[in-house]
Each structure stands twice: as C-alpha cells, then as structure tokens.
Image: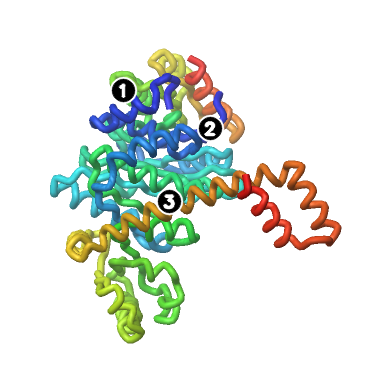
Amino acid sequence: MTSSSDSSKELFERAVKGERRSLGRLLTSIERGGNEAEIIAGLAHQVSGNTHVVGITGAPGSGKSTLTGRLLKLFSEAGEKLAVLAVDPSSPLTGGAILGDRIRMDDLAGEESFIRSMATRGHSGGLALAVPAAIQLFDAAGYEPVIIETVGVGQVEVDVAGAADTTVVVVTPGMGDAVQANKAGLLEVADIFVVNKSDRPGANDARRDLELMLDLGHVSGLEQITGYRPPIIMANSLDGTGAEEVLGAIKSHAEYLHNSGTIHNRQKERLVKEIQNRIELLIGLTADGVLKSELGNRHITQVLDRKISPAEAAKSIVRLLLKD
Amino acid sequence: MGDYQQRVILAKLGLDGHDRGIKVVARILRDAGMEVIYLGLRQTAASIVAAAEEEDADAIGLSMHNAGHLTLGPKMASALSDAGMDIPLIIGGIVPDEDVEELMSAGIAAVLGPGASAEEVVATVQDAISARDEA
C-alpha cells in the first residue's frame, strides 16, 4: 500500500493494461473487504468469466506448493501468463501469518506470471469473499489459468478449492486406508488426484486405495452421474516426476468440461455460491447489529428469563427483520 | 498509521545461508499480528522488487550475515527507488555500528543488530511503516 489517492477505478484500468503494482494494490483492497472491495469486484466481474480456475489442495506438507511451482514452470514455458493465489492460515491467536509458499515457486515462475500470498485472516466469510473476487480480478487482467492453492483443512478452504473449474487433490503415502479415503470430504471435490512423494514407501498402496474408492463410486452409481473418473497421477514434485502428466490431466479435464458443457454449471455454481456467501455475510452483519439494538435486547431478556427459547428468539427476530 | 493488516516481506539477498535469525524475526512479527511473506534464501534485488509489487508489501526486511550489507543494502535500496517503490527497507543481522550511518544515508530505514529484543523488532518495523504512511 502506498499513500496515494488513486481511485480503485484508475488502479483497475492500469491493472487490466498489465501494470502489476496496481494489481497488487487492488488485491490488498479486496483482502480488506468493505466498499472498495465491492467496487473492485464489481468492475472485475463485468469483464471476467474467461479464465480457467485450478484449485490445488491437500494436507499440510503434502507438497502442494512444490507441485504448484512445477506447474508454474510448465505453464510459463508453454507461454501462458498465469496467476497463483497461495492461501495460508492466519494465527487464530494473533491474526498474524507466515506466508511461505513463494519459496517453492519463485525460482520456477516466468516473468509474466503473478504470485500472491493470502492469509485466511480468520474472520467469518472473509476468505470466501476475497478468493472469488481475486479470481475475477486476475481473470479481468488476462491471467490464464488462475491457480488457487489452499490447505485442505477447514470447510472454507476446501470450498474455495472445490469451487475451481478443475480441482487437484494432493495426497501422500501413509495418509490412511481406503476407509479414510471415503471419509474425507476433500476427496469428493477432486477432479484429479496426485499421489505426491511417490518415491516413498506406501505410494502404491495410496494409489490402490484411491482406485478402490473410485471403483466404489462406480458401484454406487456416482461415476455414471458425473460421467467422469478422476485420474490418479503418481508424482514427485522435488524432481519434477509426474508434473507434465498433471499438466496434461488439467488440460484434458478442461476439454472435458467444455465438450460436455459442464463448464457452465461450474461457473454458475461458483457465482451462486458467491451470492450465497454474500447473503450470509450481510445477514450476519445485520444480526450483529440487531442483537445490540432494543429489539435484540428485548428478545435476549426473554430468553434469559426462560420465556422463549433461543430458536424462537432467532425466528422472531428474522421475521421482524424481513418485514422491513 | 492506519488500522490495516501490515504485510512484511522477509528475505536474504545473495549468497548468505544463515537463516536462523530471519526465521526468529518472522515468528516475532507473526506473533505481533503481522503477515510475513517469507521469501527465504538466495534472492536477488529484482526478485524482491517483483515480490514487493505482487504482494503489495508495507515493509521489506533483509537479513544479512555475510558482511555484504554495505554493497547489497544500498543496491537493494536503489533497486526499489529505481522501480519507484516507496517501501521502507530494514536490515537486520550482523552490521558493525560504524556502518549504520552509511546505510541510513543510502536510504535504509532502520538497522537491527543481534541484541535487539522482540519488542524493538516490532516497534522498528511499525515505526518505519508509519513514517512512510505519514510522508
């Protein structure tokens, strides 16, 4: 941030023309949320909808950043101008964060590519609003593809990665048996599986467990509904093994989405989800205000006196609010 | 100083593998509520300028333990000003007292030595950012 009074609109025009610093500043405004963020997201939305969004997720330490670094190199070599949004958790205690994903990407990035680190910042809905807005901004500025890298823990992070056009789930040997693989909601959002650290013992077991899980999808009929079976790719991001295959799988999946028309559903789902998140945020903010108001106090007192239940109080307040 | 989330880039420039100190500083700043973008070892002035643009950093901290500060410190400062970027640059590490003045006159915002406490580190970064914001 610099202490200049450039308006968001001017910054946006410059970012679209390729000025990286303006794009960097707009991303900061988006992260901060509020009116400016809405104005920027609005400008970006008008001219977005063109890029391919790739989500990369998996457990901490599974090699997401290293794989992303490999993809950065391959996409850059193929002449693509791509953006990476690397999301890392904020400390719930202090709000601070150490964002270290760039270490594994910088050497491999082409000059045209753009890497931005984003902290989860803990507050409700923040990430869920900031990430789609950042995607639209990258899209408007002509970046393709846009890669979103998030830790696969926490619903919001999984949602964010799962809302991509192509979601890559990175697993490592020793993550657990097939029952675990069925349990984890993370796996259901996968369009491509990568078994990373494939030189480690147990890599083939991990692959077999995933194959079995996908076979069960065939038995239950899930695969027939989607008509798509996620490929499983063995990779070792340290030496680059498998990275080209991951790139190929992302391109094949993109083709599948376009040929089957599924791409429109995905894009629609993502926008619907964003509207929903914004509704929830607005209602949440309204609720905060109401609880501090006279109306709220009246309900709180009745709940404390055991005259009405918390559920009845909530319904009554919402009913009164929606009337306005 | 505005009430916003401060983002600080930490990096080591050139051939200098002593990264214990920078890791301690990263943790100190994180625990003070800042977002630390950790670039790690073997950065160049150009890679730090690019990262500062993309990350919209509020400050840059360079860790130096190879006696290269009088060469690399001013080089980094001029790389930033050549790029038209007004971001405070802070050097931490092993810097002899008699070199501090030369660094400050080359545009370095502050120098932190090995005796600096966690409070001093945080205050120095915050002051450098405030000074820039008020300028």
Front-most of A223 and A196?
Answer: A223
**What subunit carries mark 1?**
B
SS for tag 2?
Answer: loop
The residue pinned by badge 3 equals A274
Question: Can you give x and y, in whole percent of width and height, for residue A291 in the image?
Answer: 71, 46
Q: Residues within 10 Å of mark 3 (few under 14, many from 20)?
A: some
**What subunit carries mark 2?**
B
Front-most of A284 and B83?
Answer: A284
Question: Can you give x and y, in whole percent of width and height, for residue A159 in the image?
Answer: 43, 59
Front-most of A214 and B26?
Answer: A214
Mark 1 residue type = Lys
Name the mark nearer the viewer: 3 or 2.
3
Mark 3 residue type = Glu
Pointers 1 and 3 in contact (C-beta within 8 Å): no
Looking at the figure, which quarter contains the N terminus of chain B?
top right
Write the residue at 37% across / 66% down.
A189
Mark 1 vs mark 2: which is more N-terminal? 2
The residue pinned by badge 1 equals B75
